[in-house]
Image (cartoon, helix red, strand yellow):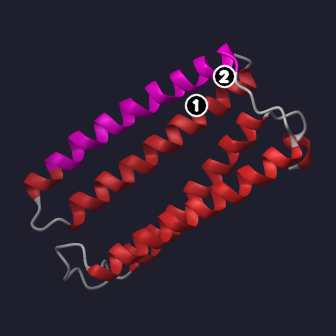
Amino acid sequence: MGEVSMGLSFQEKSLWLLLVGVVVTFGVYFYVALGTVLPTSAARNVMPHQVVYFVIAVIALVIVQVAGLIVFAAMDRRTTTDERDRLIALKGTRNGSYVLATGVFFALCVALLTEGNFVFMHVLLAFWVLAQLTETGSQLYLYRRGA
């Protein structure tokens, strides 16, 4: 990892932090939340304990992001953005929005085909996570490509 992290800008470091944070926190969330329902298949609606899991995942992600960004800012005072950074962010946002729009369509189809809100909510959440990963991954790719 030392070789990869050499020469990374503040923006790239923060993107890597976000990518890893989203994968870990929501990976754990889906493992726990779906693991409590899939064996029984009894729950058709999101249960209160699953909402608690979601809240914990979001809080953990925020804590990791804030702590990581503080460390990155303390290590590297060059946190300004330029036109290239804004263009890369815009392209990443565009790519992520395509995934999110597709996910909303699929979630609406699922809502029409299933009872309760459990599947709908988790399809929507999964596509939101996938959209965030697409946006972040696109930006990291564009930074490495030199776009």
Is 38 on the left-hand or right-hand side of 19?
Answer: left
Please say if 21 is above or below 43: above
| Residue toward you, 13 or 120 | 13
Image position, residue 112 (x, y; %): 8, 52
Q: Position of residue 6 (x, y in %)?
A: 90, 38
- Dot 1: few (<14), some (14–19), or many (≥20) neighbours within 10 Å? many
Q: Residue at position x 43%, y 68% from top? A: 30
- Residue drawn where x is 12% and y is 68% of the image: 116
The relative height of residue 47 versus residue 65 in the rendered view (above or below) is below
Disc 2 and disc 1: Cα gap in Å? 12 Å
Q: Secondary structure at mark 1?
A: helix
Q: Position of residue 130 (x, y in %)?
A: 45, 46
Picture residue at 48% right of the left edge, 63% below the top = 58
The disc placed on residue 85 is 2
Q: Looking at the rendering, which quadrant does residue 44 occupy?
A: bottom left
Mark 2 neighbour density, 10 Å: few (under 14) some (14–19) many (20 or more) = some
Q: Is residue 82 left or right of residue 18?
A: right
Q: Position of residue 90 (x, y in %)?
A: 52, 22
Residue interval drawn in magenta: 82-109
Q: Quadrant of residue 60?
A: bottom right
- Nearer the observer, 111 or 40: 111
42 drawn magenta: no
Mainly helix, strand or loop, the magenta region? Answer: helix
Viewer-side residue, 85 vs 24? 85
